[in-house]
């Protein structure tokens, strides 16, 4: 069981500095310094720590920002960092941090939270889309420029920007006391979701297709590698191929009116498989 705490003191922020170094090793310039974290915490921002006993094992940092609508700017919460120590991943820490954020942001009177993540990281896709109920229709190319930390170095820093509408029934059904059961690949196949493309699965890692057909239909499935970080370590050129293919894929689908509404982690076959679910039209929200 993990404890989530609001962080406010300089001593706590120094702990959080060190935790960032362990989560994103290799680039000191990417570490948020303690003095900035203190300033955020005391000026409408949100700095959370997840603890196993007295050890900090996870962090979340966010702040209030603005976005434009036709009648002028509106406030939102921008979620900047979510990180968990490697040994604590897949234990519910990330979900617990986001659930605490959900509760606090609603108390602040905000209804929208945005953040970015690498679309090829299936663990993040499963958390953000399937478990939290966020949606996505924004693809950002090279948003952070050249990144130097150990997880991101060498690849284009393309990201999804996702929208988390925290007051919707969609989100409440996932974070409430009786969350929605996860839908399976078989559920979507029964709903006649169309696979956008086949992947080559003859080697150790799946390979993207040479060409992408124009998307069509109301409900689409797009397969991605299940462990992109392992793939990147083993075959960097294949990782690059997936980056450029997924860029074409999602930019094409978003421009055609599709948005990502779910994520599937399928264990029914010989190898685990990961899929984004795309639906046409904002009515699916």
Image: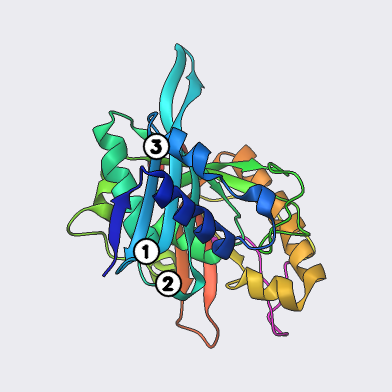
Total marks in image:
3
Give the magenta range: 193-208
Which residue ends up furthest to the right in the rendered image?
Answer: 237
* 104 left or right, relative to 28: left
Mark 1 or mark 3, whichever is nearer to me: 3
Q: Give the Cα distance between marks 2 and 3.
A: 25 Å
Whether the magenta-drawn stretch holds residue 165 is answered as: no
Residue pictured at 29% horizontal, 49% vertical: 100
Task: Point out residue 61 in the picture as x, y percentages from the top left corner.
Answer: 45, 45
- Label 1 with label 2: CB-CB less than 8 Å: yes
Q: Which mark is residue 88?
A: 2
Q: Give the overall secondary structure of the magenta segment.
A: loop
Instruction: Classify 28 as above or below 36.
Output: below
Find residue 64 and report its horizontal and vertical position in percent. Answer: 43, 30
Furthest residue toward left? 177
Say which residue appears at 34% left-offset and 63% top-offset.
51
Question: Earlier along the polypeptide chain: callout 2 or callout 3?
Answer: 3
Residue 104 sits in quarter: top left
Q: Which mark is residue 205?
A: none
Q: Secondary structure at mark 2?
A: helix
Quarter of the C terminus within the rendering: top left
Mark sitting on residue 41: 3
Establish if 30 lies above or below 52.
Answer: above
Q: Which residue is label 1 attached to?
A: 93
Q: Residue furthest top?
A: 71
């Amino acid at each position: 069981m993990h404890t989530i705490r609001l962080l406010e003191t300089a001593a706590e922020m120094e702990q959080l500095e060190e935790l960032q170094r362990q989560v994103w090793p290799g680039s000191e310039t990417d570490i948020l310094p303690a003095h900035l974290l203190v300033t955020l915490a005391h000026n409408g921002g949100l700095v959370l720590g997840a603890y196993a006993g007295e050890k900090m094992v996870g962090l979340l940092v966010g702040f209030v920002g603005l976005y434009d609508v036709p009648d002028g700017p509106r406030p939102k919460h921008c979620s900047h960092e979510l990180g968990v120590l490697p040994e604590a991943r897949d234990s519910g820490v990330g979900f617990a941090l986001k659930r605490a954020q959900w509760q606090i942001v609603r108390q602040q009177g905000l209804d929208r939270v945005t953040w970015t993540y690498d679309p090829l990281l299936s663990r993040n896709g499963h958390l953000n889309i399937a478990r939290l109920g966020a949606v996505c229709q924004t693809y950002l190319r090279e948003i952070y420029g050249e990144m130097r930390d150990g997880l991101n170095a060498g690849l284009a820093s393309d990201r999804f920007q996702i929208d988390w509408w925290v007051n919707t029934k969609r989100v409440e059904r996932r974070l409430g006391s009786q969350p929605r059961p996860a839908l399976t690949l078989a559920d979507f196949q029964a709903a006649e979701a169309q696979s956008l493309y086949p992947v080559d699965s003859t080697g150790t890692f799946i390979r993207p297709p040479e060409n992408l057909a124009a998307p069509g239909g109301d409900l689409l499935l797009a397969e991605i590698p299940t462990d992109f970080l392992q793939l990147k370590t083993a075959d960097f050129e294949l990782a690059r191929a997936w980056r450029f293919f997924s860029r074409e894929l999602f930019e094409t689908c978003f421009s055609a009116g599709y948005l990502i509404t779910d994520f599937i982690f399928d264990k029914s076959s010989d190898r685990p498989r990961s899929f984004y679910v795309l639906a046409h039209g904002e009515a699916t929200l």
